[in-house]
Amino acid sequence: MEQFELFFKHDEETLRRWLEKETRFTVRLAVTENSTRMLSVKGVKGGVSVRLHRVFLEAPSDVLKEAALFIKKRRGKTPLINGYIRSKRESIKEGGGRRVVTRTRGEHHDLQSIFDSLNSEYFGSSVRALITWGAPRSRRSVRIRTLGSYGYSSGVIRINPLLDEKRVPGYFVAYVVYHEMLHAHMGVGMNASRRSIHPREFRERERLYKDYLRATVWEKAYGA
Ligand SMILES: [Zn+2]
């Protein structure tokens, strides 16, 4: 048992070499400011390519060990990493310290009340994320597929303002919110590689949403 916590306050290269030693892979490492994808791993020729948020440079050793194991297996639960990111949330706000201004009341849908009732119905009110309508974009630049997102270090769920329309049923908005809340609830491990953003466990839990069927049918029929 360790009597004290060992902190890495090293540069990228030290961390990269340490990860190679732990995983026995050749590691390509990029340190990022990307708070939506705190940790991502991709297999490349001869090894792995890892992208890590810069907060990992000063993470305690048990957190880094968990990261190394995750990089090695490219799956698994990451409770230490999730807790670490949560503890860092205040110091690494999205956009380098800008305060997050939330706007929850739309013209047709109130995100906070949707969030609150989903939280008590499905998560025992344990999800602490903030929620907001995203910034409106010009029609041309809208990426239709991105209906919602969750930033792991900021703890902010953003919902595409395109959904704040009368024709969009409340159960569909709630479905998108529920999806992002699941990301917040299940943690960063889910984000490791493209393939495992929504692993089986995620998909199974997603189906527990009571209007799942209705929402997916609506999306196919009328969605963007
Ligand atoms: Zn998702």
Image (tube, rainbow, N blue to C red):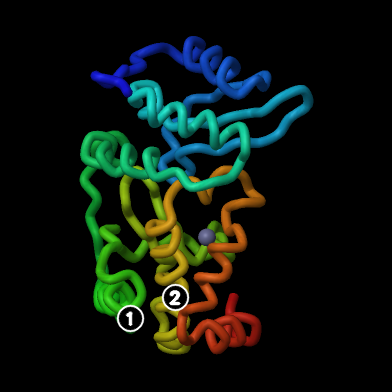
Q: Position of 45 compared to 23: left or right?
A: right
Query: Which residue type does callout 2 highlight?
Result: Leu
- Give the x, y percent position of residue 23: 60, 24
Mark 1 sits near ligand 1, with its Cβ under 8 Å away: no
Badge 2 marks a residue whose secondary structure is helix
Q: Residue at x 57, y 86 (%)?
A: 213
* Quarter containing the N terminus: top left
Is residue 29 depicted above or below 197 in this figure? Answer: above
Residue closer to the observer: 37 or 22: 22
Residue 173 is drawn in which quadrant?
bottom left
**Which residue position is annotated with label 2?**
163
Q: Residue at x 46, y 63 (%)?
A: 148
Give the class, few, some or many, for how many residues have Cα within 10 Å of label 2's Cα (few <14, many ≥20).
Answer: many
Alpha carbons under labels 1 and 2: distance apart = 8 Å
Is residue 203 depicted above or below 46 in this figure? Answer: below
Residue 135 seen in this snapshot: no
Q: Which numbered disc, 1 or 2, marks the residue that appears first in the sequence? A: 1
Is residue 137 depicted above or below 173 in this figure? Answer: above
Query: Which residue type does callout 1 highlight?
Result: His
Q: Residue at x 55, y 12 (%)?
A: 17
- Give the x, y percent position of residue 139: 52, 65
What is the residue that sits farthest to the front in this orientation?
Answer: 1
**Which residue position is annotated with label 1?**
109
Residue 145 is drawn in which quadrant?
bottom right
Whether tag 1 and tag 2 are in contact, CB under 8 A, the answer is: yes
Residue closer to the observer: 204 or 115: 204
